[in-house]
Amino acid sequence: MTPNRREVLSGLTLTSAAVLLAGEAHPMSTLAAARQESAGELAPAYSGQHAIAPLPFDPKKLRGISEKLVLSHHENNYGGAVRNLNKVEAALAQVSKDTPPFVVAGLKERELTFSNSATLHELYFGNLGGEGGAGGEIAKAIGATYGTLGRWEEEFRATGASLGGGSGWVILSLELSARTLRTHASGHHSQTKAAALPLLVMDMYEHAYQMDYGAAAAKYIDAFFANVRWEEVERRYARALKAAEALGS
Ligand SMILES: [Fe+2]
């Protein structure tokens, strides 16, 4: 049965949206893998067995972002989120009516933080390793939405710079209900626009650039744009439009 608009909206969190986007071309978390292996079936809750997806590009070949930084980012920050998510899920599987509420509250907060961190890192690494030049339907769509591609990039860069020295994510998304493209910033892993599908993700936590650039976040933003794999953004965009159609927007 086709879900109605309300059912789709109520079930669409960033994490589930990102799972929708998990493609066949690149290894993703076990949530995505489970979906691919048994189409139509849902992955069990609290499996605690999410895998760390390998980098989908050669870390030696990024321009302006060092191999040392990328490997540390992947292993310590992304990998740490996946490992912690598995531990939190194992604890959540043991929650009962007798578990103290403050314990449950802490676990649920950490579940959201680690699961969003894992998903956003997979999307971030997934949209790196390219040549940096936007093209195709996604470039046309951004230009049509923002006036010009350059105008969008100016705002996306400014949004990233506004988070420099702190932490957060910058995400170009397809807003499902309004059917438009929009750049959002998130100061934490768990603060982001609901019912929107991420297309282009930029990590602005200091661990994404401090090792190479110190506090010079603007240089990292230049390097990020030099390495964007727009083919992946294009693929996400095509799939996201189908989800927007499912909402009837
Ligand atoms: Fe990160």
Image (cartoon, rainbow, N blue to C red):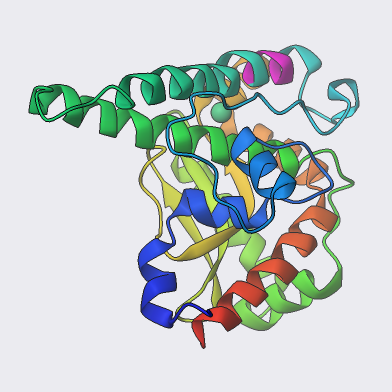
194 on left or right of 198: left
63 on left or right of 14: right
Residue 126 horizontal/vertical position (percent): 74, 41
Q: In the image shown, does 26 or 157 lie closer to the viewer?
A: 26
Q: Which residues are magenta?
A: 69-73
Q: Is residue 188 above or below residue 104?
A: below
Residue beneath the point at 62% across and 60% down: 154
Residue beneath the point at 46% across and 35% down: 115
Regarding residue 221, the answer to whether it shows in the image is no
- Main secondary structure type of the part rendered in magenta: helix
Residue 196 horizontal/vertical position (percent): 49, 64
Residue beneath the point at 66% across and 21% down: 74
Residue 185 horizontal/vertical position (percent): 44, 51
* Quadrant hosting ligand 1: top right
In this view, the residue farthest toward the bottom is 248
Residue 228 part of the magenta segment: no
Residue beneath the point at 74% across and 70% down: 238
